[in-house]
Amino acid sequence: MLSRILALADTGAGAESESATSSATTVERTWDVIVWNDPVTPMDVVVVILRRIFGYSTGRCTQLMLRVHHEGRAVVWTGRRQRAEQYCVRLQVAGLRCTIEQAT
């Protein structure tokens, strides 16, 4: 089961080129990818999913998982909206609850 989840999380992982804006004065807003706590997904699975999707170290993934566990949520990535949406979909396909919101 875990291998199937991880295989699904890897789909669409190819490198995307991000298009440049037409105006140099346009300031792009950044977006946060937020993972929410759920009572179902084991903590070690969360660590593996974060590591697989973002390529973070095991220590960093463990810190993020513990923040989710103790605080109910954690910002796991910040950047352009399109990329944030892609990460959010991949996390959802892997079985995690996540959303995006504008970074403050």
Image (tube, helix red, strand yellow):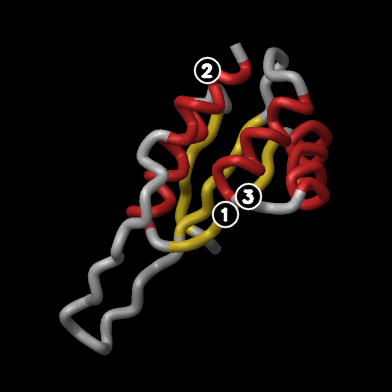
x and y percentages locating residue 83 in the rendered image: 39, 54
Image coords of residue 11 (percent x, y)? 40, 34
- Quadrant in the picture for the N terminus: top right
Q: Name the residue under label 3.
A: 75
Q: In front: 2, or 96?
A: 2
Q: Left of 86 or right of it: where is 18? A: left
Q: Which residue is at 55% across, 63% downward? A: 104
Left or right: 68 with respect to 23? Answer: right
Q: Distance between the residues labelled 3 and 1?
A: 6 Å
Of tags 3 and 2, the one toward the viewer is: 2
The amino acid at mark 2 is Arg
The secondary structure type at the circle numbered 3 is strand
Decide: marks 3, 1 in contact (CB < 8 A)?
yes
Q: Mark 1 points at which residue?
A: 77
Q: Mark 2 points at which residue?
A: 4
Vertical arrangement, residue 28 with respect to residue 88, above or below: below
